[in-house]
């Protein structure tokens, strides 16, 4: 069981919008710690997608956006493309564990 | 450009030891905290260990505490993970990553550790 909870899978047709949730608790997201998102294409190392809840590193398309509210965060992907098919992970810090925590990951399927 | 290259993975028997290395280049290694993150086959990401830029602070996941040791040699731009008393559940791809304000900005390609008799 991951400390941060993500849906195991989401799907959408090309061009559509999908969101991936990341639910934590008062010792991590709810405590004010930032949430970061990573994209992992099949067989490849993860890549930073969103940092500090809503900031995109250079080179990440603005189709990807992040938000945070209370004990949860969300990743939104608009204008879905076939190359977005990947696993997505959220990450934050947990004060009770005194360490980083990841969500269990969400597999995005582009129909 | 930032490069992180892990090495040292392989097949090892339960109870034995292994040391992973992560060679860094393209940035001032001594200025950044560094992480080890692992991914068991078909599973999600798991934080393993973190070390501050100067080695003065380190922390471990409960699953490896007392068995794994993170270290770094800033003169060699290299991060290490000494893994002792290995168990089958330690089987995973191990990634090193450069940390910046809590997020993992750059990742290596990973090295596979298989613990099996």
Image (spheres, grey):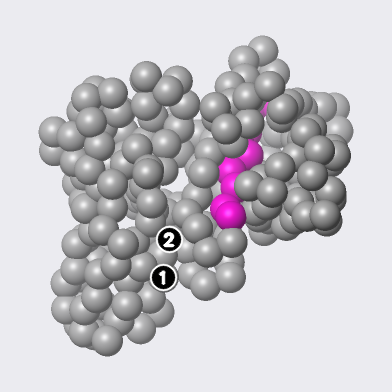
Name the one closer to the observer, A42 or B87: B87
Residue A52 to residue B106: above or below: above
- Percent x, y for residue B11? 83, 56
The chain to which mark 1 is attached is A
Query: How far, Cα to Cα, is label 1 from label 2?
Result: 7 Å
Left or right: A81, with A48 as reference point: left
* SS for dot 2: strand
Name the one closer to the observer, A71 or B102: A71
Q: Quadrant of residue A80?
A: bottom left
Taking the magenta stretch, the answer to whether it contains residue B67 is no
Name the one closer to the observer, A7 or A67: A7
Q: Which residue lies at the image location 58% right of the left edge and 70% below the top edge?
A: A43
Residue under pointer 1: A86
Left or right: B14, with B62 as reference point: right
Q: Which residue lies at the image location 75% right of the left edge and 39% below the top edge?
A: B86
Circle 1 crowding by C-alpha within 10 Å: few under 14, some 14–19, many from 20: many
Quarter of the picture holding the C terminus of chain B: bottom right
Q: Quadrant of residue A26?
A: top left
Residue under pointer 2: A39
Q: Is residue B51 visible?
A: yes
* SS for dot 1: strand
Q: For the magenta stretch, what is the residue range? A: B30-40
Q: Quadrant of residue A39?
A: bottom left
Residue B4 to residue A76: above or below: above
């Amino acid at each position: 069981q991951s400390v941060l909870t993500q849906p195991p899978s989401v799907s959408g047709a090309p061009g559509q919008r999908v969101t991936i949730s990341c639910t934590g608790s008062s010792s991590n997201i709810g405590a004010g710690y930032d949430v970061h998102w990573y994209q992992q294409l099949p067989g490849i190392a993860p890549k930073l997608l969103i940092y500090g809840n809503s900031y995109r590193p250079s080179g990440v398309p603005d189709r990807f956006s992040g938000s945070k509210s209370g004990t949860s965060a969300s990743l939104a992907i608009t204008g879905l493309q076939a190359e977005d098919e990947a696993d997505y992970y959220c990450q934050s810090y947990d004060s009770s564990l005194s360490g980083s925590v990841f969500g269990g990951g969400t597999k995005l399927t582009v129909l | 450009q930032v490069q992180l290259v892990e090495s040292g993975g392989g097949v090892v028997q339960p109870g034995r030891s292994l040391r992973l290395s992560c060679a860094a280049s393209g940035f001032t290694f001594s200025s950044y905290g560094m992480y080890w993150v692992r991914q068991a086959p078909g599973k999600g990401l798991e934080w393993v260990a973190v070390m501050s830029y100067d080695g003065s602070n380190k922390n471990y996941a409960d699953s490896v505490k007392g068995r794994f040791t993170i270290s770094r040699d800033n003169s060699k731009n290299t991060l290490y993970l000494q893994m002792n008393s290995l168990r089958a559940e330690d089987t995973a791809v191990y990634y090193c990553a450069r940390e910046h304000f809590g997020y993992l900005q750059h990742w290596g390609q990973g090295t596979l550790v298989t613990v099996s008799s």
